Amino acid sequence: MSPSRPLPSLPETTHTTTPLPTLASPPPLPPPTATTNITIIYNHFGCDIQILIVLQWAKNIKNPKRNSNPSSHFSYHISSHISGKMGFRNKLLVCTTIVSETRDEMVKSMEKAKEEGADLVELCIDSMSPFHLSEVEHLLKQRTLPAIVSFRLNSQKNSYKGDSKNKCLQVLRLAIELDVEFVEIDFELAFDVIDELMQKRENSKIIVSSHVKSGFRCKEKLGNLLVCLQSTGADIIKVVTEVAYITDVAPVFHVLTHSHVPVIVRAVGDRGLISQLLGPKYGAFMVYGSLGDKSIPGLPPLLSIKNVYKLDNVDIDTKVFGVVSNPVGHSKGPLLHNPAFRYCNYNGIYVPLLVDNIKEFLRVFSCTDFAGFSIGLPHKESAVACCDEVDSLAKSIGAVNTIVRRPTDGKLIGYNTDCDACITAIEDALRERQVSNGDVANVSPIAGRLFVLVGAGGAGRALAFGAKSKGARVVIFNRNFERAESLARAVSGEALPIEQLDAYCPENGMILANCSAIGMEPDVHLTPVSKENLRSYDLVFDAVYTPRNTRLLQEAVEVGVTVVSGVEMFIRQALGQFRLFTNGLAPEDFMRKVVLEQF
Ligand SMILES: O=C1C[C@@](O)(C(=O)O)C[C@@H](O)[C@@H]1O
């Protein structure tokens, strides 16, 4: 079944010379000299707020040049202007937020941010406690990176409730006086102070921002908020919004593409990560990253922006690939595919995609720029029904681990590279053993053996079909016995209750393959079969690759059994995927080297 996609829900990033309409369709923008009353209802911090805005367009159009620029990637051009002034011509700006109670800590974090590749820092002055304006002044004079000075009235860290507004105004005025690069005003306060700050500022750019708790499901609502922010006359507008699903990030890309004012957008939470990683493709001039090893949901670490994703290289033509999984944080795919794209001079980026509903994900991100996906747990089986065509091996397995969008017609084609990856890895290891025993045969070394499989999910299915096709007798153990039975029927094998696995030993020379999550981080102390009982196996394979050396593999080595690690399977399935993604490229030696160095 194919996802219904009458209209692509996300804009294709094409080079266009046609002027695009301003951000939101409702309300239409009046001509520049008009004065118009607009009532907009939007959700701010979870409450519906009705605002009457008197739009005085002539007054608010600070830079007429902006409006004559026909590019859809308008914010990118503005950004070049801004970053050019800051000495980073045409460079994507990478920012990190600094939240600390003291000036010393802020200065230290600023140094660290610099080391990790940040171009600028957002100094959240509301987090400083106790508040002394003289300390803020010192900090701003001492700054070693360009800065955004912000003072959020309602942030969690802000401890000056009641007196917040007054302190905020003092800070913003001071920042303007000291000619700090960016000064950020909460939307709530913007109409009260923006004229004063605009008049006094020398070079500072003024950002007006809004932090929205409940997120935006549709681009029109987000567009309306952006119109409100834009109507303040800000140089730059910023929205920080929570998202419940990865598909809620699509409206963010819409506004980035269509805005006529530079926009900073952050979708907060694990599911918002792509708002930063793919922002530059849609014209974002600034992205945020997290500092050090402090993980902040939705923010890529600064070091990964610099070393793994190299977001500076991402542009309008970059093809998007990624691993669709839940959880997804463990996947090493980004560490492998991104360097491989660069090695081959292929303009692609590979990102983690934390997906709850794969069908919905593929429906929303249906434009051709989203060119291919690795499919991880738990989506491998449901992915089959989401493809327009499925290759015969994947169809018979009933699990897809790779989807490629065919460039000629946009159709989604499903493949399974897991099967070949693990079966060839097991065969190679058994052959090596046989060669060292002086025993070489033409038939598969798996043929005739008892193949003990743990797990009947997507990877388990791939192995069961692969082993069966090589002439093995397959026995399946799975926590959900019905699933084990159904898979056993499909490969003319046998299903047994998981409780019998440990003591299972009908013969010697068996192969054990763990395709369950047993032993995966964080449960690294777990193993499916006890050390003593591993002796009846000739080979043990573990699909788990985080950690690299699972307890199962360690104990198998200790009792002298040949092992094949999930890392080997990971490399081989990724090589297969990379060939499909790039239509044939496969820098095997390079990819193996990356895995050995980084994993
Ligand atoms: O099993 C795996 C690993 C994977 O899920 C990952 O974690 O990167 C990606 C999948 O395509 C592959 O089949």
Image (cartoon, rainbow, N blue to C red):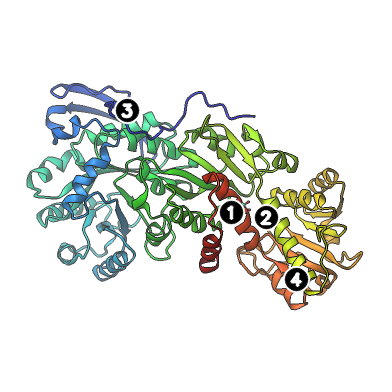
Q: Position of residue 430 (x, y in %)?
A: 77, 66
Mark 2 / mark 3, whichever is N-terminal: 3
Residue that numbered label 4 is attached to = 562
- Give the CA distance from mark 2 to mark 3: 48 Å
Callout 4 amino acid: Thr
Q: Quick one: 527 or 582, which is closer to the camera? A: 582
Residue that numbered label 3 is attached to = 24
- Give the CA distance from mark 4 to mark 1: 24 Å
Label 2 CB-ligand 1 distance < 8 A: yes
- Give the CA distance from mark 3 to mark 4: 62 Å
- Quadrant of the rendered structure where residue 253 is? top left
- Give the CA distance from mark 2 to mark 1: 9 Å
Q: Is residue 10 above or below residue 98?
A: above
Q: Nearer the viewer, mark 4 or mark 1?
A: 1
* Secondary-structure class at tag 2: helix
Q: Quadrant of the N terminus?
A: top right
Q: Quick one: 506 or 328, which is closer to the camera? A: 506
Q: Nearer the viewer, mark 3 or mark 4?
A: 4
